[in-house]
Image (cartoon, grey):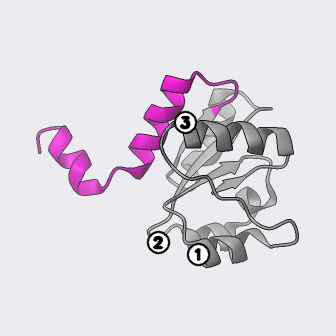
Amino acid sequence: MVLANEEVISALLGAMVELDGYSPLFPAADEQPLTAICRHRPDLVLLDCEHELAWDAHAMRCILPTATRILLFSAMRSQREVEQIAARYGIAAFVLPVAFREFTAQVDRALESPDESALRIGA
């Protein structure tokens, strides 16, 4: 699911998600973000750092224990700034513009199960 403040960024990330072999989801125009997440139950939420949900600690606490993963992004902040914000929630982050290969690597890492991660590093 893509949650971005700017429609053009939503469309760009949705296209990148589709090119990576996934089906992009977007909330309905009048739908609250948390409601959309509960309704769709996406595997991954690409969350704009400037989106209201990114600053709603209660909502983030509701999402984090679920199977839905969150990948924070920003078109307005530096990598360092967005990583500091992401660190509050223990999630990964990237900045736009992003190369397609870097984007797909971020998505793949976010969707990786803990068991797969442990196996990849030899545990």
Counting residues from the start of the chain, the first of labels 2 and 3 encountered is 3
Asked if the residues shown at circle 2 and circle 3 are in contact, with their CB atoms under 8 angstroms apart, the answer is: no
Mark 3 surroundings within 10 Å by alpha-carbon count, few (fewer than 14), some (14 through 19), many (20 or more): few
* Amino acid identity at mark 3: Leu
Quadrant in the rendering for residue 56: bottom right
Mark 2: which secondary structure?
Answer: loop
Quadrant in the rendering for residue 78: top right
Dominant secondary-structure state across the stretch colored magenta? helix
Q: Name the side, left or right, on which 23 lies relative to 51.
A: left
Residue, disc 3: 19
Counting residues from the start of the chain, the first of labels 3 and 1 encountered is 3
**Residue 40 included in the magenta stretch of the image:** no
Asked if the residues shown at circle 2 and circle 1 are in contact, with their CB atoms under 8 angstroms apart, the answer is: yes
Q: Name the side, left or right, on which 50 lies relative to 86.
A: right
User: Where residue 86 appears, x then y in whole percent?
Assistant: 59, 47
Residue, disc 1: 62
Please name the residue shown 79% across and 53% down the image.
51
